[in-house]
Structure formats: structure tokens, C-alpha cells
Amino acid sequence: MVRGARQPQQPTEFALKEIMSSGGAEDDIPQGERKTVTDFCYLLDKSKQLFNGLRDLPQYGQKQWQSYFGRTFDVYTKLWKFQQQHRQVLDNRYGLKRWQIGEIASKIGQLYYHYYLRTSETSYLNEAFSFYSAIRQRSYYSQVNKEDRPELVVKKLRYYARFIVVCLLLNKMDVVKDLVKELSDEIEDYTHRFNTEDQVEWNLVLQEVAAFIEADPVMVLNDDNTIVITSNRLAETGAPLLEQGMIVGQLSLADALIIGNCNNQVKFSELTVDMFRMLQALEREPMNLASQMNKPGMQESADKPTRRENPHKYLLYKPTFSQLYTFLAASFKELPANSVLLIYLSATGVFPTGRSDSEGPYDFGGVLTNSNRDIINGDAIHKRNQSHKEILTFLHCCCFPSLHPGDLYPFTRKPLFIIVDSSNSVAYKNFTNLFGQPLVCLLSPTAYPKALQDQSQRGSLFTLFLNNPLMAFLFVSGLSSMRRGLWEKCQEYLRKINRDIAQLLTHSRSIDQAFLQFFGDEFLRLLLTRFIFCSATMRMHKIFRETRNYPESYPQLPRDETVENPHLQKHILELASILDVRNVFFENTIDDY
């Protein structure tokens, strides 16, 4: 039992009299019906206590919370079935209202959503969607507006916000648009009826979700001009297959930290556009939960280990340095053998305050983390026997909270795959591999051409290439919409390009072995091929002419065999020809350098 949670008690006799007072004289109530109400109150109280106890569970670590989640699921399953089986008695004797049934369903939807966050298994999103949909279809909250209780209306508004998040993650954009309209009407009615202080906050929620669903710079259209919803999760044919006999590492991606700390980027429910896109790039297409063997919170037998479908992920929106380091340490500690930890940093760049005579891991700046007031105190700065430079470095790290390359050095004791999307990504270019483990850093451009329409608020172009390379290619080519048939044709050609990029990497004689160590994992293989496609596209594009406009990597890729390979350049020109945008690319790229 989580600290602070108490065992639920049976309802008192007085409470039962109050509960059943509307159903007639107490003596007239059959004993069986009295027991039904008593059992329902017990399950309801126990479910609430277990649910409230979830917030006391540690957010990191993958084992401490499972048994507690399992007990909570069991109680809510019993409660849901119990109210279904005894609905008439509960209506007559308890006065069960439809919004109370909706609250139970909403809690179960929240459980499934949080189980998805804990496990990264997209199947649980479908279960959350099922319960949220049932609430809407059966109008469980329809009578709330007739009661003069603003707190009940807020429950309804929060339900809509949670439902929208699940639909966004499942790419159910048509449902999202309907929900946004309904939420807008509910907020208008709420603010009209009650003189509340949270009107601005709820209107901000509407603005955020509206901006979020409009973040994609390109629309794919059917023949009737309706928008096609595209998914960017890993499909069965998504990653290029390995050639027979190809020698690559056997590492698999087990854990990922997805960190978002960009100023002014569109976000909804502590999920920025960049975080949302990277999250989907590290997941497979959802399956129906019914096809899986496990129940939430239950372990399979030890003699039947199963491969996790998706890498486990932590989503950290504007974390402090201490929070980020705590989650990093937890992931590092629990990383299984022959596994990879991925760190994705989408954050504002923090640059060094002055010149340095050395080129150490703290001399090039880093990326922004949130301020941590706890470390700005006299005790933290009490250091003895340190040089003047060491003290200055310490003060700089405390007063300007940022994550430097050197902060990640302890975690390079295990295979580490880093993606940095930042205006100071090059700070991670001069990494030092101290422990000989596989280590790769993919680094975004530090600036984009002025001629390119500024899309930074709607997400980074670099991350868009890693999530949806065709959409990014269309955007840099000046296209804002495309017919479905042409889109599918280009996607098929892009799969061919990815296969050829995979061959370029594995056939290269001068490539650093770290890249090949990671190439056995489907997710990392797809990220690497998309990174090379992104870099090659930008190098061929006529407006990307400065060095800072190009992605970089650590270790460096052999350019002539990868990002500047003539065979790959020919493919990119062919893709541009299909789209009739060949004029925005150089024809003889190598001669133009």
C-alpha cells in the first residue's frame, strides 16, 4: 500500500441511512439491496483511494509501480462490472447519477492512458479511447450542465481535454476537431453561467490544441479535398530490411528520454510538437489489446519472456537539471544488457559567456533546462581546494541551468544514442568516448536559411525530417499540399531511397563502427537513414548554403560515401522530378562545393 493510503471502511449505518433515504423507509429496503449499496460504496471508496495513491508512486523506474497499478485496475474492473449488474438497485436506492458512471469510466480511461505512459505500449491508448468514447456516445455527462455545481462542469471539461490528448496520439484528427468544437461550446456555456477565474486558462487550452493540430506544414488531400490522416509510427515495412549476411550490431533500443524545452514552441498537455513527433517515431502502430496476453499490471510467467514492442520512454517537458539527471540515472540503472539508451533533446541553446582557452566538455555551452532554485544557495557553492576556473565553471552551471556534453559522460558507460535539436547542437559535436561503448550523436543545423519561412513555433524542421521525411522534403521544396495518390507514390520511392541508404552505410569501408553497432535495431536504423536523407537534401538545396544549415554527427560520417554520395543525390533529384520541384536543387552538387 502506498504511504498515506488507508484501507477503505465499510459505510457506517448513518451513511447508509443517508444514502438510501430517498428510496423509502429503511425497514422497507430488502437486505440484498442494502448489501448491494454497501458493496458499491466500499468499491467506490477503495477505487478512489487507490487512484489517488497513484500520484505518490515514483515517476521513474519500471518495477515499483506495476503491482499497485494491477490492484487499481482490478478494483476498477470490479466496480465497473458491479454498477452494470446492479444498475437498477443503485439507481433506486443509491441515487446513482449518469455523471457518476461517467466519472468511473473516465478514471478507467485515465488508468489506461497512464499505463501507456509507463509502458509505451500503444495498445493501451486504444483502450483509453474506448472508455472515453463510451462516455461521449452514452452522454454520461449530459446532465451536468443542469446542476448548479461548477466543479462538476470542470470535471466534464477535463474529460474533454484528456480525450483530445488520446485522440491526438492515435491520429484520430476528425474526432479531435469534433471534440474541440464541443469543448469550445462547453467552455462558453461554463463561463456564461458561472463567474469563474479560470476562463482565461480554458480558452488557452482551446488555443493550444488548435495550434497543435495545425502544426504540420503540408496537407495530404483526397480527391474530394478532405484531409488524409497520415501515421508516422513504425509500420511493418517502415524500416529498411537488412541484407542477408549483413554484419551489424545486435543492440536494441530499450529506453528513451524525450525532452522538450524550446521557448515558444506549440504544445498541448505538456507535450511539444517536437516531443510528439519524436514519440511517434519511436513507436509501432497500435494493436488491439485483446490480441495480447498480458493484463495491465500483470507480469507474464518467467519462462515466457516476450520482446517489448516499443522502447520504454520518459516524456519530460521543461525539466530542471535535477529532474533530468534523476530520470537519466534511473534509465541507466535499469538498462538491460545489449540495450541502448536514447536521449532526445529539443531545447533552446545556451552559449558560453566568454572565450575559453581550453576545449573541454563544458566550454561550448549546452542546451537549456529549467531553473532549479534549490541549488542557488550558499551551501551549494561552498567548494574547497578548487582552481579559479573550476569555481567559475561551477557558478556558470548553477546560475545558467543547462545540460552540457560533459554532463552526459557518466552515461557513456553503456551504449548511448543522442539526438540534439537545438541552436547550439554543435556543443555536442566534440564528444569524447571515454569508455569505448557505442556512442552516436545526431545534431541538428544550428540555423536555417532566412528565405525559408520560419516554422520554429510549429516544430523543428530537423525533427520533422526524422519523423516524416516526405513532409519535410515537401516543405523545403515550397509545397503546402499534395494529392493522396502522388503522396503514396513518393512514399514508395522514399522507401527505396531508405533501402539504398542502408546499403551505403553497411557497405562503407570508412564508416565508424558505432553506426553499425546501432543498425540492428529497427528504430535506430530508420532514424539513421532519415538523418542521412535529411543531410543530403539540405546539402543539395539551393538555399541551404551555409555550414550551419547542415546537420552534423559524432562520429563524423564519411561524406563521399553517405550524405554526398552521387547515387543518393541522383535519387533525391528523381524524387524532386516526381514532385516537379527539381529547380530548387543543384544538379551537379559536388561541383558546386
Image: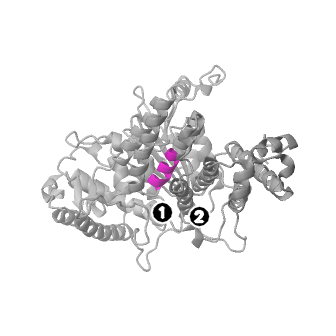
Residue located at (62% from left, 42% from top): 326
Q: Image quadrant of residue 77?
A: bottom right
Asked if the magenta segment contains residue 407, the reply would be no
Q: Main secondary structure of the magenta part?
A: helix
Numbered badge on residue 338: 2
Which element type, helix, strand or loop, lies under badge 1?
A: helix
What percent of the width, then of the height, locates residue 27?
Answer: 87, 49
Residue 420 visible to the viewer: no
Residue located at (58% from left, 73% from top): 291
Label 2 neighbourhood size at 10 Å, few (<14), some (14-19), many (20+)? Answer: few
Return the residue nearer the eye: 140 or 325: 140
Report whether 163 appears left or right of 208: right
Report whether 14 appears left or right of 406: right
Residue located at (27% from left, 53% from top): 218
Tag 1 residue: 518
Which element type, helix, strand or loop, lies under badge 2?
A: loop
Label 1 neighbourhood size at 10 Å, few (<14), some (14-19), many (20+)? Answer: many
What percent of the width, then of the height, locates residue 573?
Answer: 18, 63
Above-or-below relation of 246 to 577: below
Bounds of the magenta segment: 160-169
Q: Residue furthest bottom?
A: 244
Residue 462 visible to the viewer: yes
What percent of the width, then of the height, locates residue 459?
Answer: 36, 45
Return the residue nearer the eye: 264 or 385: 264
Return the residue nearer the eye: 418 or 181: 181
